[in-house]
Image (cartoon, rainbow, N blue to C red):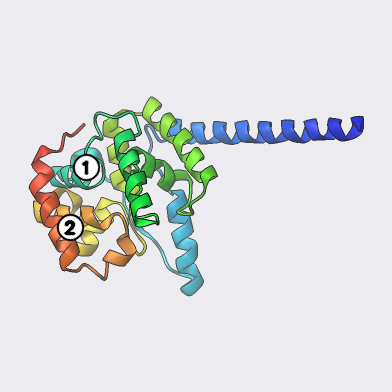
Amino acid sequence: MKTLWRWTRRALLALVLAFVAYQLWLLGHVLWWKWMPPSETSFMSLRLSELNEKKPDTELHYRWVPYEQISVHLKRAVIAAEDDKFVDHEGFDWEGIQKAIEKNQKKGKAVAGGSTISQQLAKNLFLSPARSYFRKAEEAIITVMIETLWDKRRILEVYLNVVEWGNGIFGCEAAAQRYYRVSASRLTPPQAARLAVMLPNPRKYETNFGPRLAAHAARIQSRMQYSDLP
């Protein structure tokens, strides 16, 4: 019995040490990316693997651009569409989360997430689209790291540069070139609004941008002027 308890304690200690080591690895990346552009994210790696299964020589479209070279209209549109309290919260919109829970309970399924831009960035950088309690807990830990070590300007800059915007399309520069043949700095308000409303399901909306989504884009465009920017 004593031998079993000793091995159990060792196994638990090993798990704790592995967990701490993983958090330190994440923290190291968050610190590095405070100043340096990510060369690849978890979502990029996953999508590239999926694409390479069908076509081995497929490459992602991704090009980093600094904050100053991103259209102010896109910044406002994404905040209006994804997280209108972005500059005020500390990583979590508790009111939004509560509303999402109530909406999901009413519908009987997950139809709303309530995630902030900071949470979505944490997921994109390190995790996967799979849903689980462990992933949500890890997402929360990474969100706290990002919000603690980065300012809001950096969070929005990285998010707009790495978020998925279509099949193999990552970041606002690649999206602007793909959909409008312009640089991210030259996006107009209507173009920015259309890109912003694609974010919840970009690979679907890339080829299926119907009247309902167009109407949503028009609503976002009308609200963009009220978006506070970092």
Image spot of residue 149 (x, y percent)? 39, 26
Q: Mark 2 Cα within 10 Å, few/some/many (few <14, many 20+)?
A: many
Distance between the Cα atoms at labels 1 and 2? Answer: 13 Å
| Residue 187 in view (yes/no) | no
Image spot of residue 48 (x, y percent)? 45, 61
Q: In this view, does 77 lie to the left or right of 90?
A: left
Residue 194 location, quadrant: bottom left
Image spot of residue 11 (x, y percent)? 77, 36
Q: Which residue is drawn at 51% across and 36% down?
A: 26
Residue 118 vs residue 178, the one in the foreground: 118
Which sits earlier in the primary sequence, circle 1 or circle 2?
Answer: 1
Q: Name the quadrant of the C terminus.
A: top left
Residue occupied by mark 1? 79
Could you say whether the residue bearing mark 2 is in a helix, strand or loop?
Answer: helix
Residue occupied by mark 2? 194
* Residue 109 position (above or below residue 159): below
